[in-house]
Amino acid sequence: MIERRPFSSLGKANFGWLNANHHFSFGRYMNPERMAWGRLRVWNDDEIAPGTGFDPHPHRDMEIITYVREGAITHKDSMGNEGRTEAGDVQVMSAGTGVVHAEYNLEPGRTTLFQIWILPDRQGVKPSWGAKKFPKEKREAGFEVLASGRPQDAGAGALPINVDGAVLATTMRKGQTLVQPLGAGRAAYLVPARGAITVNGTAAQARDGIAIRDEREFTITADDDAEIVMVEVAAE
């Protein structure tokens, strides 16, 4: 099963400082048919105006992964962590028993990012935060694991998350093809951050969502130069 979710069909919320697009039900956007995809619960496509951001607020029992597409995001939390994550890089926060954090765009221009929430396998764990640089040139035509709790990714250098799942990314040049396996009982959700792609014959434009399950593998073809982010999780 492969389903395209056009960018135009996503939930919308524009607060002036924040222009948010929701792949799944979130905030004021409620769509019973888009509550989750396996363990994946949230995928927000956010544009944050310069000098603004998310003031301190709490979370618990959620794995929150931020993939910065443009600009940078500056993080501060109740655990004493502070950091700045730039375009192409990733930060992960395991909310666990509870954490309060703030995220600001302190850059002169807008920041755009994907904010991804995955339901953890274990609740009530100690909260944590981490960030890492991932040079894009190392992931051409092959998915690089950015964050993972899958057993097979141990020692791969990915940021740790508290779930049997992974966040991955690849860049592809126009005309390149990539075959990606997907095991039984697993689901994938991928979004081209830029460029156009075709997945098993289903065409998608930049910022469209592609939901995949019940496929042993799928083939991605880059119709333009493309940058793709994907989440792979248990289907149930």
Image: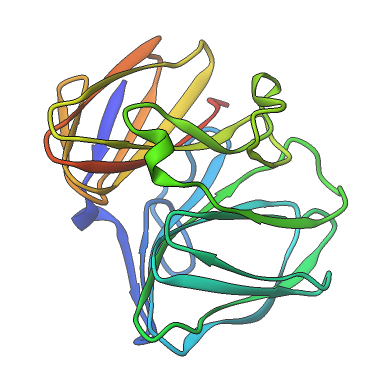
Residue 170 seen by the camera: yes
Q: In the picture provided, is 152 more to the left or to the right than 36?
A: right
User: Residue 183, position in %: x, y?
Assistant: 50, 12
Q: Quadrant of the C terminus?
A: top right
Instruction: Name above or below for residue 66 compared with residue 37.
Output: below
Instruction: Name above or below for residue 152 compared with residue 192.
Output: above
Q: In the picture provided, is 175 more to the left or to the right than 12?
A: left
User: Residue 46, position in %: x, y?
Assistant: 39, 67
Q: How many marks?
A: 0
Residue 34 seen by the camera: no
Q: Out of 234 and 89, give the one closest to the viewer.
A: 89
What color scheme is it?
rainbow
Q: Residue at x 65, y 36 (%)?
A: 157
User: Residue 159, position in %: x, y?
Assistant: 66, 43
Instruction: Name above or below for residue 234 compared with residue 138.
Output: above
Residue 226: name its quadrant: top left
Q: Residue at x 55, y 65 (%)?
A: 85
Q: Out of 209 and 27, give the one closest to the viewer.
A: 209
User: Residue 63, position in %: x, y?
Assistant: 66, 49
Residue 82: name its quadrant: bottom right
- Determine the residue located farthest toward the bottom in the rendered image: 51
Instruction: Name above or below for residue 149 compared with residue 23.
Output: above
Q: Residue at x 54, y 15 (%)?
A: 185
Q: Residue at x 31, y 20 (%)?
A: 1
Q: In the picture provided, is 27 more to the left or to the right than 111?
A: right
